[in-house]
Amino acid sequence: MAELTWKSTGDRRRSTRAWRVRGSAVTVAVIVLAVLLVPPLVQLDEQAVDLAAKLRQPSLAHPFGTDDVGRDLLLRCVYGLRVSLLVGVVAAVVATVIGTAVGAAAAASGGWFDRVVMRVVDLFSSVPHLLLGIFIVAMFSPGVWPVVVSVGLTHWLSTARIVRSEVLSLRSRPYVDAAISGGASRLRVAVRHLLPGVLPQAGLAAVLMVPHAIWHESALSFLGLGLPTHQASLGTLVQSSRGPLLAGDWWPTLFPGLCMVIATLAIAGLAGAWRERLNPRRRSELML
Amino acid sequence: MARMTARRALFAVPVLLAVTFGVFAVAAASPFDPVKAYAGNAGLTASQETLDQLRANLGVDQPLVTRWWEWLSHAVTGDLGDSAVLRQPVAQVIGERLGWSVLLAAVAFGVAIVLGTVLGVLAARRQGGWFDRGVSSLAYTLEAAPPFWLGLLAMWLFALKLGVLPAGGLTDTGSATVTFEQVARHLVLPAAVLAISQIPWFVLYVRQGVADALEEDPVRGARARGLAARTVLLGHALRSGLLPVLTLIGSRVPELITGALLVETVFSWPGIAAATVQAATSVDFPLLAALTVLATIAVLLGNLLSDLLYGLADPRVGFDG
């Protein structure tokens, strides 16, 4: 076993971290521009079936290849990312709003209400998210909205915990005491003094939630319980690639998943940099 | 220890009551109609009288709390109702499949814990070194990769391209008996994929824990006393660095169940997952309800296990939590 080294590797780590953040920012920008601009500008039909060109290997004409009915997979992936990101962002916003409201209400009222609410949060965390999601989607029939609702309803727990502890720590700050003794109303204290302190944490939680939500949507879609198969999302693309894969064609499976990995890493990389600025003392290498 | 286990078991009762009630409440709020589900296509042509009769027979006209209590009192005696889609009692469906799911999850979890700890320690030994950076980057990437995608790619590579491992199922097609050798061969791919999907968390936690521990005073003291690097790393740093991992074991159980659900689906493993997906696509309420409760029990057991381990490993923590 080699000698343990004790020399500082700080400089090198700081510079690789800076490059990681820059890379993430560029990737997120490219993805957002692609999903916003490609559909209106390119005017290609992602559903255009071309049976003569089915299951083509990746080439210059089709960088990601074509699927089993000859649709261009690069275009399908862009549309899939668009749907997945949309579902992810909406679900993350829903979850963050619920979590912030619950966490803030619990911390602000304290006492038995706080205890009951946090017990409910513990309770919800005892059920595996995906299973709860499957249950909700099954009961309300698959589709975009049940997926958004099920992801939103299962992911607010961590936000509620974060917001609660943040409000609790803010409430004991001197400036809040000063505002209260100065005669500010409860509402004014909440809106002017507590909310601005909580928003960055809640925003960070929301950004970190987006990859989770995308992951969830794709898992539900992969199980056949999410979006309808003709609707390209990263999950449905992987789901519908199972047939070609069994025949030995790897590209319809590889590229949608790769899009998801890259998007997740980029979003998490940006969020990680943001978290370091917010909580510089609790530096963590853990991203998600 | 026994006291803590008993206390947790007592705490589990209200949790399970609430979860089952929540399941019934969601079902009641949804547009799902058990009568139509039970009658199937025949329900489209049946007269209103027949449907009403069926409604009364199934007890659907009862209020939510009554139905929940009815289900609960039967469940306590082991009668979980009948699965409409699999045409079997729910208890039998679960009994036949649970063992295979537990086998897969336990093997994968064991591999993930052992391999994750080893890689994490090796990475923490020289933070910022090439091994550390390689392992960490790989861990981040795997953290972002969905298990079903990894499973499909692994299936393509090992079963289709290289032909070294079977692509799915429990035994070879056409083989009627389940032999140990066949199950072991069929277990390799799904267990490996499930383990790989869980490893990143263990690697990153162990790495962080051991790296933090290397900066602590006892470790510095041990080094100052001139102990061998290996003794310091394994005897001092790893011991305190492992503590957060024990908590992680408990908190990863829900993710393990989620991962197993997806991996089982990819590899047609005859466990709980296939039943869950079938139950969900055909809205088989009794089966879904039982599976949700089962998963909750597994999560509670995982939490208990991790707290017990923590109490055993760290004498500062008692068993009175």
Image: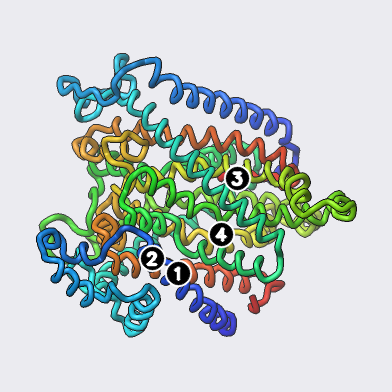
Specify few, some or many for label 1: CA neighbours under 10 Å numbering under 14, 14-19, or 20 or more: many
Q: Is there one chain holding both mark 4 and mark 2?
A: yes
Q: Is residue A189 left or right of residue A141?
A: right
Measure the alpha-carbon separation of dots 4 and 3.
20 Å
Q: Is there one chain holding both mark 1 and mark 2?
A: yes
Circle 1: element type: helix
- Percent coordinates x, y for residue B157 in the rendering: 29, 39
Give the residue displayed 57% in from the left and 73% down from the top.
B308
Where on the picture, by quarter, is residue A56?
top left
Name the amino acid type tagged 4. Answer: Leu
Q: Is residue B170 left or right of residue A163?
A: left
Q: Chain of mark 1?
A: B
Residue B292 is labelled as 2
Give the residue displayed 32% in from the left and 33% down from the top.
A232
Circle 3: element type: helix
Tell us which disc is closer to us: 4 or 3.
3
Name the amino acid type tagged 3. Answer: Ala
The reply to whether residue B118 is in sight is: no
User: How many numbered discs?
Assistant: 4
Residue hosting label 1: B19
Residue hosting label 4: B248
Measure the alpha-carbon separation of dots 1 and 4.
23 Å
Q: Sequence-wise, which precedes: disc 4 or disc 2?
A: 4
Specify few, some or many for label 2: CA neighbours under 10 Å numbering under 14, 14-19, or 20 or more: many
Tell us which disc is closer to us: 1 or 2.
1
- Percent coordinates x, y for residue A208 in the rendering: 56, 42
